[in-house]
Amino acid sequence: MNTFKRTVIGMAIAAAVSLGTAHAQVSDGIIKIGVLTDMSSLYTDLAGAGSVVAAKLAVEDSGIEKRGYKVEIVSADHQNKADVGSNIARQWYDVDKVDVIVDVPNSGVALAVNQITRDKGKAFLAVGPGSSDLTGKACSPNTVHWAYDTWMLANGTGTAITKQGGDTWFFISADYAFGAALERDTTAAVLRNGGKVVGGVKVPLNTQDFSSFLLQAQSSKAKIIGLANAGGDTTNSIKQAAEFGIVKGGQKLAGLLVFLTDIHALGLPTAQGLTFTETFYWDQNDQSRAFAKRFSALDKGIYPTMVHAGVYSSVLHYLKAVEALKSDDGTKVVTKMKEMATDDPLFGKGSIRVDGRKIHPAYLVQVKTPAESKYPWDYYKIVATIPGDQAFRPLADGGCSLVK
């Protein structure tokens, strides 16, 4: 055997040994991602099967499997019940060897998963839940909160509407952790900008009939009726408010968390003029449009929401951290994610703070009129851009124990 051949063979063996050593630190030799989401209820279109699609696209685009890593994706429906979500999380971590849980569009479920993930030393990419407590009093070294949160929504929508003269508010809030956090954070924004809250009502999750709650809001005479709900609850309350003639009577609705799929369900004649805050819109640039085209082909023609975009973005960054660390140890990977700058096609450049808050711009958007919309899912016009350092709660104000 000549010297050249011996050198080539030696290099190949060294590379194989090196790859084997790197992958040996990945538990079971597999990076296992669990998408825990709402597959059957009011958040299914804004997250649901689309979140699984987004995770798969992130794995594909990361190229990690071409470099010898094995990645597996599992999914489950938490049914918007904290006990169901908790049982799935424990089963995944203890028995199925899931390394990271992603999405979880329900703050009650997410807060439970947040604690279990910390106890098990795994990783949680919270994309769907809104409660800002995930980076506040409930912050964890094992959790990253990705796309949006209630403080951001309140700071964007609540501040803008109050400054525009909407200075008296009545809240219709979902009666669980998310609704409470969104009402709390929006109330603070309203008061900070010289407004006042004249009343509010709590509504059970997945309510079909909002008539009694809307009548209370109507009789309050508040200029703004703040909808601290999401998904099917938002679309039902807006549709029924139109039937009651609330907007025609001079009051305005503030959708504090509205998704692209909600506007699609409502239709532009009903939704036109709504103002709210988003962190992603599919029609922003060539990269987001290309992603939307691929995504919609795999998710029943649905265009991606900021949750879908957040799942894609967070999984992409998680895999970069695993590869850089050569390990899928949850606590270490989240630490590595915070050390690395974020950069992806959908959110651009950003960062992750010590409290786990992912930082990127937010956008105040307004829903187009039917005449302004030129093609399918052409629903938004961006009114203002809120820089990342202003969009999210200041680090010192959250009460997170990780902040020194």
Image (spheres, grey):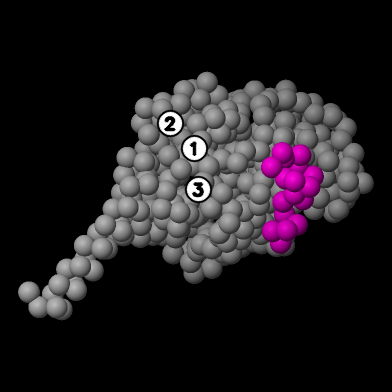
Question: In terms of sequence position, does the residue under pointer 1 or pointer 3 come before the other?
Answer: 1
Q: Residue 255 versus residue 79: which sits nearer the camera?
A: 79
Residue under label 2, please give it.
93
Nearer to us in this view, 32 or 243: 32
Q: Mark 3 points at which residue?
A: 333
CA separation in Å, label 1 and label 3? 9 Å
Residue 391 forms part of the magenta stretch? yes
**Secondary structure at numbered mark 2:** helix
Residue 57 placement, left or right of 276 = left
The answer to whether the residue labelled 1 contacts the one labelled 2, judged by CB atoms less than 8 Å apart, is yes
Residue 57 picture location, percent across and down: 39, 54
Quick one: SS at disc 3?
A: helix
- Name which residue type carries label 1: Lys
Q: Can residue 396 be seen here?
A: yes
Mark 2 → mark 3, Cα distance in angstroms: 16 Å
Name the main secondary structure of what is drawn in magenta: loop
Give me the residue at 60% from left, 45% from top: 145
Residue at image location 78% in from the left, 47% down from the top: 396
As for residue 47 lying within the magenta part, the answer is no
